[in-house]
Amino acid sequence: MTAPARPKVAMLLYPGLTLLDLIAPHAAFATTTEAHLVWKTTAPVRSDSDVAVHPTTTFADCPTDLDVLFVPGGMGQAPVAADEEVLAFLADRGARAQYVTSVCGGSLILGAAGLLRGYRATTHWTGIDVLALFGAEYAEGRVVVDRSRITGGGVTAGLDFGLVVLAKLLGEDVAKMTQLMLEYAPAPPFDAGTPRTAGPELTAMARAGSEQVNEAMTAVAEELATKGWGRAA
């Protein structure tokens, strides 16, 4: 007997991605799927924390028959959302993939490629207003599932997201075993993980740190609208 084929997952890389947005889902996927780290070339890609990640394939060589297309967020998300080569890749693979997915600001990149119009989705709390510019309906939640779209909230939601996707692909038992092997039983030291619990002062400070990225993404959305991107679901 031959072993069943592993689900094929393509995970977009780009300069300035947030490492945990990528690595947390990858940790969930690594042992039971065929995960591809995809960029234009196979040269190392630096994250927004200056850690380099090595792509395993290019846009040209990435499998076309994907089970999952995945996009992380990051401080570099505006330039990549404006890159029509990236958008063309996402639109092509997204039209074929069983699930089109993201974590954090990755949903804004999916939106730029026209892949979230008419879908409920989540993103990092600082990017909620920008998400609407791409025709998506914001839904609160660590992980939001709307038909073939699965989106995770900010950064740390990536592991929750990965387990939800894994359960969709391979069943709850596989997802639960993966959670157990990762010893994922969170007990954060502080109750400051959302604006509601962090309070107005910390929230204002955190929001200020994201203003530049969100202003850039807003400009990208306006520019892409004139070119027809972001319109097709």
Image (spheres, rainbow, N blue to C red):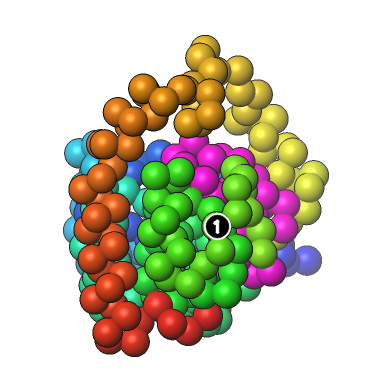
Residue 187 at what x, y percent from top left?
60, 18
Who's the residue at 60% across and 63% down the image? 120
Q: Is residue 52 left or right of residue 153?
A: left
The quarter of the picture where residue 6 lies is: bottom right
Q: Is residue 166 covered in magenta?
A: yes
Quadrant into which the N terminus falls: bottom right
Does 162 lie within the magenta span?
yes
- Residue receiving disc 1: 138
- Residue 41 screen position, x and y as percent: 23, 67
Residue 96 relative to residue 230: left or right: right
Q: Residue at the location (33% across, 31% down)?
A: 204
Q: Which residues are magenta?
A: 147-168
Q: Is residue 150 left or right of residue 147?
A: left
Given the image, on which type of amino acid does mark 1 rest?
Tyr
The residue located at (40%, 39%) in the rendering is: 20
- Whether residue 35 is visible, yes or no, is no
